Image (cartoon, rainbow, N blue to C red):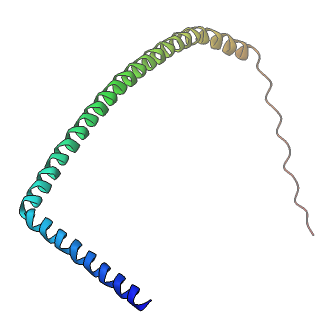
Amino acid sequence: MSESTQERKEKVKQKINEIKTNVETFISDIKVDDLKKSFTLMMKEAQKDFNKIVDQDLEKMKKKFQKEKVELEKKTKKFLTDQKKEISALQSKLEKLVKKAPGKKTTKKAAKKTVKKAPAKKKAPAKKKTT
C-alpha cells in the first residue's frame, strides 16, 4: 500500500507541476497591461450604456410627470371654476335674502313700537337680618 500511495503522491505532484507550468505559460502569453486596458475599456463602455439607459428612463419619467402635471392643472382649474360658480350662486341667493330682510326688520320694529309694555315696578329692597 505504501508503494501505491507513494505512486499517487508522485502522480499528484506531476499534475500540479503540469498545471503550474500551464498557468505560467498562459500568464506569460497574455500581457497584464493588455488585460487591464481591455478591462478599462469594457468598464467605460458599460458606464456609457448605463448612463444611456438612465437618461432614457429619466426622459420617460419627465414626460410622465409633465403629463400628470397638465392633468392635475386641468382638474384644479375645473374644480376652481365649479367652486366659483357655486360661490356666485350662493352670493346671488344671499343678496336676494338680504334685499328681502330689511323690509321684514322694519315691520318687526313697527310692531315692537306699537306694543309697549308698562314699566315694571321695582321690588322693595330686602331687609337685613340682625342676629
As displayed, is residue 56 above or below residue 118?
Answer: below
Left or right: 29 with respect to 2?
left
Who's the residue at 11% across and 59% down the image? 35
As displayed, is residue 12 above or below residue 85?
Answer: below
Left or right: 67 with respect to 103?
left
Which quadrant would the N terminus be assigned to in this image?
A: bottom left
In percent of width and height, residue 60 lies at 29, 31
Dividing the picture into quadrants, the one containing residue 78 is top left
Which quadrant would the C terminus be assigned to in this image?
A: bottom right
Dividing the picture into quadrants, the one containing residue 103 is top right
In percent of width and height, residue 57 lies at 28, 36
Dividing the picture into quadrants, the one containing residue 118 is top right
Numbered disc total: 0
Which one is in front, 31 or 93? Answer: 31
Who's the residue at 15% across and 46% down the image? 45
In percent of width and height, residue 13 lies at 28, 81
Which one is in front, 53 or 98? Answer: 53
Left or right: 96 with respect to 51?
right
Left or right: 77 with respect to 116?
left
As displayed, is residue 6 above or below residue 124?
Answer: below
Which one is in front, 48 or 115? Answer: 48
In percent of width and height, residue 14 lies at 25, 78
As displayed, is residue 9 above or below residue 47?
Answer: below
